[in-house]
Amino acid sequence: MLQAILGESLWVFLGLTVVLVGGCAFLMGQAIAGTWRSYWQILPYSLILAAANRFLAFSLFQEELLAVIPYLISVVVVWALASFGFRLTKVDQMVHQYPWLYERSSLLGWREKQGTP
């Protein structure tokens, strides 16, 4: 059951998809936010990065290349980590770019400062 969802090995999934490609996804989200681009651009880049992940799993670990379920799981992992990186960077940008308007309210949020028009 787990093999049909994640691929051939749990260790390959954790090492390749979560750590290596997930780290790239986090940096991708930061880069998209750092250049003030829209959030929706994370989705097409996530699809491409997840396809590269499937190719690496196929070429390095002899997993099935065109497995749909592991690809969709990879898309979800990549999208989630890219979204996390995007949001962290966007909050940091808003708080530091407009310090007279906004203050950090949590790790992933900001709010208007009290007394601003």
Image (cartoon, rainbow, N blue to C red):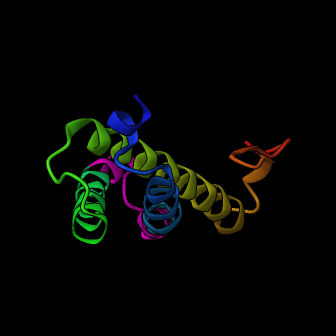
Q: Main secondary structure of the magenta part?
A: helix
Q: Is residue 92 above or below residue 46?
A: below
Whether the magenta-drawn stretch holds residue 36 is answered as yes
> In the image shown, does 21 or 61 lie closer to the viewer?
61
Q: How many marks?
A: 0
> In the image shown, does 4 or 21 lie closer to the viewer?
4
Give the image location of residue 4, x and y in percent. 32, 34
Give the image location of residue 33, x and y in percent. 47, 62
Residue displayed at 45% across by 70% down: 31
Q: Is residue 67 above or below residue 13?
A: above
**Residue furthest toward the right?**
114
Residue displayed at 30% across by 47% down: 43
Whether the magenta-drawn stretch holds residue 14 is answered as no
Q: Quadrant of the C terminus?
A: top right
> In the image shown, does 75 or 101 lie closer to the viewer?
75
Give the image location of residue 50, x and y in percent. 30, 55
* Left or right of 90 in this view: 36: left
* Left or right of 7 in this view: 15: right
Residue displayed at 25% across by 64% down: 52
**Residue furthest toward the left?**
66
Q: Is residue 14 above or below residue 113?
A: below
Q: Is residue 72 above or below residue 74?
A: above
- Looking at the rendering, the stretch of residues picked out in magenta corresponds to 27-43
* Left or right of 90 in this view: 117: right
Q: Quadrant of the N terminus?
A: top left
> In the image shown, does 8 or 78 lie closer to the viewer?
8
Give the image location of residue 97, x and y in percent. 64, 67
Residue displayed at 78% across by 51% down: 104
